[in-house]
Image: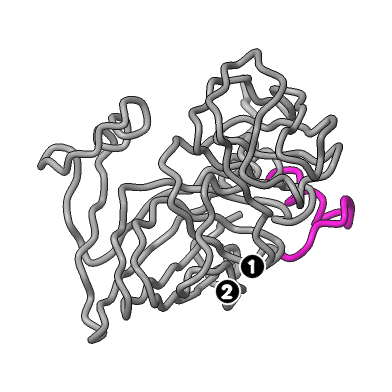
Amino acid sequence: MNRQKTNKENINTREVTTEIVLRNHAGQIVPVWNETWLGKFLREHFNFRNRLPLLGFYDSVLRTHNIITNVGHAAANGRISNQGGYGVFTDIAIGTGTLSVGATDMALFIEATGNGSNRAAATASQVTTSVTNDTTQLVITFTFTGSFAITEEGIFDGTAAPTQTTTTQSRINTDTTVTVTSGASFTNNDFVQWEQEIIQVTSGGGTGTLTIARAQKGTSAASHASGTTLNDITANGKNLLAHQGFSAVNVASGDSLQVTHKYQT
C-alpha cells in the first residue's frame, strides 16, 4: 500500500522566553538565581523560596519562559487581522507580586513604579531563531534609584500602568463589597485585577467602599487578605500579552536590569 506523505506544520511553536541580566553600580554583572523545575514548582504551589542546590543555581543570566495570556492570544490574532484595536506590544513592566502567574492574568500583581522601575517602551527588532525573522526581540534596561525585589515581568501594548489602590479589610470568596484606601480613580463597570481574580465594580465607584461582581473573565473567586492590591485594568494598564514570575532579583540604587524578550512564532 502506498502511503501519502504529508508535511504537517507544528502549530504549537509560539514561545516567549526572557533573559534578565543584573549589573551593579559599577557595571559588573551580578549572578542571579535560576530555578529548576522543582524550585519553580515549590515556589508556585507552596511559596517555598529557599535557595537550595536541587532547587536552582546562580548564573550571569536569568533565563525563563513566559505564559502567554488569554488576552495575548486574542491580541496576536487581532493584530494579524487588524481587529480589536490592540496596540503594538513593545512595552515592558516589572513588579513585586509573588503569586503564580496564569493565562487569565490581565495585569502584573503589583506593578513597580518610581525609582527607575516605571513601565517603558523597549527597543524592538526581528531576529532569526529557526526561520528568517521568525522572532520578535524586545530589549530594555531599567536603571534604579531605589531598592526592589523584582519577582514578575510582562509585555503590554501601552506605557501607562494601571490605577492601583489597596484593600483595608480581608475578604472571602463570597463577599461582594470591599473597602479600599482610595477609590477615587475607580468607576462603576471598571474591571479590576485583584491578585489572581478579576472583579468588576458594580457600584460605589469613586468611594472607599466598592461593590463588586466576583470571578470575572474566566477567573475564580478567592479569599484575599487586607492590604492586597487592586489594579484597575479598564482605566489604564492596556493589554497584557505575556506574564512571568520568578525568584526574587534584588536590586539597589545604582543597579541596572536588562530584560531581553524573544517571542518566536
Determine the residue located farthest toward the top in the rendered image. 174
Residue 52 in picture, x, y percent from top left: 12, 40
Asked which secondary structure carries label 2, the reply is loop
**Residue 25, image quadrant:** bottom left
Label pair 2/1, CB-CB below 8 angstroms: yes
The residue indicated by pointer 1 is: 90
In the rendered view, tell whether residue 171 sits above or below residue 166. Answer: above
Q: Is residue 7 visible?
A: no
Mark 1 belongs to which amino acid? Thr
Residue 245 in picture, x, y percent from top left: 42, 46
Q: Is residue 212 visible?
A: yes
Does residue 31 appear left or right of residue 125 in this picture?
left
**Residue 192, image quadrant:** top right
Give the residue at x 57% y 43%: 166
Which coloring applies here? one colour
Observer-nearest of 201 and 18: 201
Q: CA distance from mark 2 to mark 1?
A: 6 Å
In the rendered view, tell whether residue 228 sits above or below residue 258. Answer: above
Give the residue at x 63% y 34%: 104
